[in-house]
Amino acid sequence: MQIYETFGNYVDQWSRTDPQRARWLLKTGWEVQDIRYRVLPQRELMPADRYLARVMMDRMLQPLKRPEQSAVVSIFTPCELLQEVGLSPYNVEGFSSYISASCAGQGCLQQAENSGISETLCSYHKTFIGAAERGLLPKPRCVVYTNLTCDANLVTFRHLAQLFDVPSFAIDVPMQQNEENVEYVAGQLREMAAFLEKCTGTAVDEARLKERMRRSRRTLENYERFQELRMDRYVPSDLVTPMFAGIANQLFLGTKEQEAYTEMLLREVRRAEPAAGKRIYWMHTIPFWSEAVKKELSLQRSAQIVGCEMSEFCSSDFEPEHPYEAMAKRMVYNGINGSVIRRIERGIESAKRVRADGAVWFCHWGCKHTLGGAQLAKKRFEAAGIPLLILDGDGCDQSHGGEGQTSTRLGAFLEMLQA
Amino acid sequence: MNGNKTYYVCKYTPVELLAAFGAECANLNSMPRGFELADQIAHPNLCGFGKALLQAVMEGRVRELVLVNCCDTIRSVADVLEDSGRLDFLYLVDALHCDGVCSRERMAAQLKGLAGAYGAYTGRSFDETRFRAAFKAPERVKGPHLSVMGARMGTELFEMVENAMPLPVQNDSCVHNRSVGEMLPPEGLDFDALMNWYAGEILGQIPCMRMTDNTGRKRLYHDPDLKGIIYHTVKFCDFYSFEYAELKDHANLPLLKIESDYTVQSSGQLLTRLEAFAESLAPEERKEREKKMGKGYAAGIDSGSTSTDVVILDPDGNVVTGIILPTGAGAALGAERALEEALRQSGLKRDDISAMVTTGYGRSAIHEGDKSITEITCHARGAHYLDPSVRTVIDIGGQDSKVIRLDENGAVANFVMNDKCAAGTGRFLEMMARTMEMSLEQMSEIGLSWREDITISSMCTVFAESEVVSLIAQNKPAGDIIHGLNKAVASKTASLAKRVGGEETYMMTGGVSKNKGLVKTLEETLGTKLAVSEMAQLCGALGAALFAADMV
């Protein structure tokens, strides 16, 4: 841990005076971590998950290496179009998590608050804004985002587009699930294709896009099948793997790497050991940094995370031959769009599929959608026979504190499940 | 509030359409005293307005409610209220985020959906005459005025703002700048065409922060009659902090930022800031005072949460005496004792004092003074007297911390205060000293010598205390822990200084300026020297005395 802290301190200090140098250090540090993933992978994880960790690190490095070939995106932005024009996703949630894991997040959070941004804003967004304001993050080609569910998207990405002084495109996603709304979003996605073509000078090839959408569907089908097969298997998990899967199942859909990952999962889950310990289904983000959560759930046979809603927001129920409508349907019918009751019911269904013994509803600081639905979730999960723990915390900000409370709550919940 | 009305909360609500079905619509805008019922069914960290809404419904004060998908909080409120079954009629309008042609079509579909649902609920049908009659042009303040902008401001807080300000105030926050009604519906349209037109009117208003393109908001602050802005944010509503971040650097107008949690109590705590802002807008008012009797001495009393300070000036403006006493149980009594002591030390009588100004938290409880002025204005004046080159004053007091920027005449150019939690205040350090079982004097010295650069990551007093306890358990030296605490306070304070645009020369005032370790760490964090006068703790009282001298 000491080495990460020292690294983070240097990134933080240099970003105040020499952002270019700080950015170089951040990139170099991540490249070292990338090599470490290849040479010294986390042996306890399945090979598929080790592969995913490497893919994630590679993808995070892309915007630092070639920022002009990247687009800043929110997590629910469909990225197949980006891939078609050769842009890599430069994602707020992913980047902020890596900055935080590199122990360089505090200065970024402080920077954003200094500029007047509310301290109650989601820390994923605040970390990214602070890092961008400090000049730690390079200028992308453009910004593409959607207002799907998360309020912070509406303001953060507009602010980033101004800050980086690049063109931006917003996708307005209505709350209700119906064909008219799918058409409305599909129309915007066609405009988005034109926007990206203009930004990059690269044309979107409809035939290739369809092929990419077929790959996206196969990938999601594989993942859904994996979760089904997981119901009576022990799949070792740390706290970051479910988050990696969550990011990858949104942003990397349509890539060969993501399809390969899900194929590996399917092969490996069939060979996995029989289920062991208590099985927890996790709603919303996971505080990867929390020692209290690690102690109970990271690579523990006694209890482990067997699924996270973040990786199951998108359904494979779409028609790749109509790629724009397919992407639009994935957004309008996304598990987190609309009433929180939809989200809860989907969570219950997913938790049942993996035979979860209990669920955690993680109230990430600043996420009003999750906070507001907490009591409803408790009522409905428990009515469905799945005990639910409402856990307050922060998925990204390591200074959030409250480790003692987290440890007591989570520990008592697991004791209760084991009793 | 009563059950006969149909309440709404957002300017994108089609209130004219509801009126066409005979509804009597009202903006739900009152601030509750607390959120007990709301917290039971939702979560404490929702925005205060969302909780006010839940509270009103759970108290049975609302039976019909039409919401708009304004934000995650309001959507959550709709979910929770739907589940509660406490309303006779609840509808969530899925208003779009753009006002292009396609969005208008989708919005028109939403309007028709609401018309169908409300018609079925009331058993009434659409009455075009009523619809047309409901369009009324909004009234606006004319002539020089101030404006409240940002997140919605409750009725009680807005009244307080109006009372405190020297100019009329326009409420342009959130729902209050609704502009539907400026145009009347065209004649001869069928219902569908009328709804299409109406959807355009609703989406075409001055955009709120939830709209994708919000450049039209500039209209709000480009009014030549606008003389100042009171920018309001609600705790846990993040939209408007982005506009504030931009405005604070670009608005060429006096700007005050205030934050409330949408309770009546939180509004009360904002009074000092509002009054200080009003003072900075109309400084000339203080000079027009009648001459007082006495021997030409002037006194200033600063009634703080921890100590009460008195400064007396002679007729030539020289400091005769300055004393500091604990405030004790009551502000008025504490002030009386401190004044008696100051008079005794200077050999003066009460009648020798020609004018007296009170300042500090207890200022309004002291009836003896000729005038009360906020401690922000007084600290600025006192600091300017002590060193005219000072442009930024950092005052960390017991209850709050402030950073004040001055102009070359010692008048307040801008200021910010911490939020109401104790993070970054004198009380935070006091509590930590108590946890470490040492006095504040010991803390001041010990914090100067440290070896390991510890970071106390949590600024929440409660969590920070548990971090300190765990560091003590790890046998970390006291100097290292205190340095960590000093860094935490310094970082919070430096953040305030950046927000206000702090510039050299910096002066530190207030009791915490005696903490040597903190002063050193703060200097390192800010990258500048802090002037600390021997009269640092008396700066507020000195400023008050100087204002009193103006009246002599």
Image (cartoon, rainbow, N blue to C red):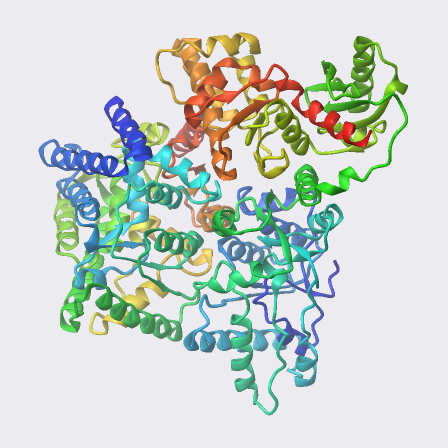
Q: Nearer the viewer, residue B88 or B321?
A: B321
Question: Looking at the image, which residue sits at the far bottom?
Answer: B188
Q: Position of residue B30 (x, y in %)?
A: 70, 53
Q: Residue, x 61% and y 78% (percent of image)?
A: B183
- Rendered view: B36 above or below A339: above
Between residues A180 and B300, which one lies in front from this camera angle? Answer: B300
Image coords of residue A120 (percent x, y): 48, 42
Q: Quadrant of the C terminus of chain A?
A: top left
Image point (62%, 58%), residue name: B172
Residue in the foreground of this view, choosing between B277 and A277: B277
Give the farthest residue toward the front.
Answer: B316
User: Which residue is at a point 33% across and 55% down the rendered structure image?
Assistant: A165
Q: Position of residue A52 (x, y in %)?
A: 17, 44
Residue A70 vertical position relative to residue B397 in the rendered view, above or below: below
Quarter holding the N terminus of chain A is: top left
Residue A277 visible, this angle: no
Q: Is residue B72 visible?
A: yes
- Above-or-below relation of A374 to B415: below
Left/right placement of residue B535 relative to residue A227 reads right
Q: Which residue lies at the image location 17% right of the left edge and 32% below the top edge?
A: A44
Return the residue found at the far left: A39
Count of numbered badges drawn on the protein? 0
Position of A246 compared to B285: left or right?
left
Q: Give how far across and how far down residue A79 sits, in percent.
A: 24, 59
Say which of A59 and B358 sits in front: B358
